Amino acid sequence: MTEIERHDYDVLVIGAGGAGLRAAIEARERGLRTAIVCKSLFGKAHTVMAEGGCAAAMGNANENDSWQVHFRDTMRGGKFLNNWRMAELHAQEAPDRVWELETYGALFDRTKDGRISQRHFGGHTYPRLAHVGDRTGLELLRTMQQRIVALQQDDFAETGDYEARLRVFAECTVTELLKDPAAGPDGAVAGALGYWRESGRLVVFSAPAVVLATGGIGKSFQVTSNSWEYTGDGHALALRAGADLVDMEFVQFHPTGMVWPPSVKGILVTEGVRGDGGVLKNSDGKRFMFDYVPDVFKGQYAQTEDEADRWYEDQENNRRTPDLLPRDEVARAINTEVKEGRGSPHGGVYLDIASRMKPEEIKRRLPSMYHQFKELADVDITAEPMEVGPTCHYVMGGIQVDPDSGQSRVPGLFAAGECAGGMHGSNRLGGNSLSDLLVFGRRAGLGAADYVVGLERRPAVRAEDVDAAAVLTLAPFDAPEDRADDTGRAENPYTLHAELQRMMNDLVGIIRTESEVADAQRRLGELRARVRQVFVEGHRQYNPGWHLALDLRNMLMVSEAVAASALLRTESRGGHTREDHPGLDPEWRHRVLVTRCARDGADGLETEQVVPRVVVEPAERVPMRADLLALFDLAELEKYYTDAELAEHPGRPA
Ligand code: FAD
């Protein structure tokens, strides 16, 4: 093996979105030498694309808001599958994290009396999303980058080296985590191997703590709001290192993506449009969401258009519009309208803000949406409705972590942000991701720092593991006829990716059935065999075919986790709709589906290196603490919980 570039840090953060940057800031502020590695340019991440805002119960727009109300909304949105400790920490700490951003230099939009302005979003009882127009993520990420530069300037003043304690490795993709098997019974994380996208040269990072903050998995689906980086790398890296994933059946299809023209299908239309007054209509011009309020939310949403419209001005005396039901409900409603023939010409429905707000107000409040439609679809949203339909947007499932420290079951391996699981249960509320990544990014940085400080012996990277990871990373360049399992076939990564995306969209998408998901599993098995035969031409310098070939390994593992979990959960809840099991089943509420890598021999599966097999099994969820359970009315809980689970509720007669 040729000489490999090497770096040594205390904490390695993989991912430079909001979660990664917040974790890195925390670790560096605790005095640890910290590296940030990101697959794309520094500053280009999903976080920067977030439009609507960051949910935090600051009570600026309605003083009745509190962490308890935010906690309740989050649990309801997730249909009570959320890891309640994460939901509690998130609701309690989000306001401080937003304020902290202003101390870093962020400037949120203001109310007339100078407080941080907060807007309505689906599932939130009160206006709760701190925002900067419809470019909130940009401000969030820009501010954290600014904080990183400030820390680097401090280091320069002290050491003469800007990168003495905090360095960014941009356009560098991590392909494998490295462990030290001698560090404890299950081994411990020791670092990671990656490659520079531009040169294709390999690079090894030694670090006793690794924070995964790699974001989502959307690129496994054909219609998605996600950009090219979101191939489930962190999910797959964690699995291969021995960590568990939870809740992988729960994939969020955002109700409003662009549907036309085809080249932009899936691009997000922010929920802020509905939060600011936009309404959904079918081809008959009917505001159809009034027909889709499910039983569990009956009584909480307006029943007439008049009441819904009054609610925007007066939330105390009116109920909210069903246009702002949680995303899973709205996406399913749109799907039904289109299927039943009341859709728009290009297979969506209409989203109308033009008839509800003055053109200059639309341009002021939703500038990105105005430009997006004008430039990409030649539609003027101040004069005509938008055509919208569901798009794969977010994964609720992810790496199982300790809520307080962000540590996975692998010592030294931490995760935060979208790649971590549990916080959002079966469905995430809009705005709860930006606050999630701030709260848990900080906690993971802190957890990683505490872990490193407490180590008696630093785990070491082994030369043979580096060699093995390098061989796997370079395997797509090996001629198919030279491979051990030679079938003489050479597969093209782009073809396989297109097949995977189409299949996941059609068979494991917004509406699922047993036979379709089983079919998906069979096809995933075929794709796994074909991925071993992927061959890329050319050399290592900036070779996107090679990059995709490596991403495919991760997409396949993650897709198998989604499909296997979707097959097991025989109920419909949040981001998982089974046409053959349409209702909520209380017996499934207390179960979590856990995905792990198959163990050699022990699981009756033949394991393999390129795309290791995954196993999904149910486990019991930790029951909610009694004081948190008491925040809900018994009548509401009875819609979700079994009698046995509610035996201790204070509302139950003794
Ligand atoms: P990301 O911001 O996704 O960053 C992931 C990082 O990991 C990137 O730097 C990437 O390059 C890196 N990475 C990935 N794989 C590797 C690898 N193998 N090696 C090295 N680096 C790697 N949420 C809200 O709360 N409010 C909103 O208004 C909102 N609007 C949204 C609009 C859009 C269009 C989209 C797509 C999402 C929106 N979301 C919103 C969701 C939210 O933006 C994301 O869930 C969140 O930003 C994820 O943050 P993160 O830090 O976990 O990861």
Image (cartoon, rainbow, N blue to C red):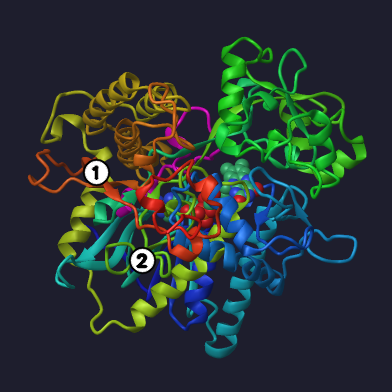
Image quadrant where one finds the N terminus = bottom left
Q: Tell me the distance, in whole angstroms, between the alpha carbons under discs 2 and 1.
A: 21 Å
Between 26 and 390, which is closer to the camera in this rendering?
390
Q: Is residue 573 left or right of residue 400?
A: right
Task: Spot the residue most to the left.
Answer: 601
Residue 157 visible here? yes
Judged from the image, the secondary structure of the residue bearing numbered disc 2 is loop
Residue located 65% across and 60% down the image: 56
Q: Amino acid at mark 2?
A: Gln
Between 168 and 257, which is closer to the camera in this rendering?
257
Which residue lies under the disc numbered 1? Answer: 617
Residue located 39% across and 54% down the image: 647
**Residue 423 % position (x, y):** 47, 54
Image quadrant where one finds the C terminus = bottom left
Q: Is residue 402 left or right of residue 362?
A: left
Is residue 220 a member of the stretch shown in magenta? yes
Which residue lies under the disc numbered 2? Answer: 407
**Residue 44 % position (x, y):** 58, 52
Q: Which residues are magenta?
A: 217-238
Residue located 66% across and 42% down the image: 122
CB of mark 1 near ligand 1 (< 8 Å): no
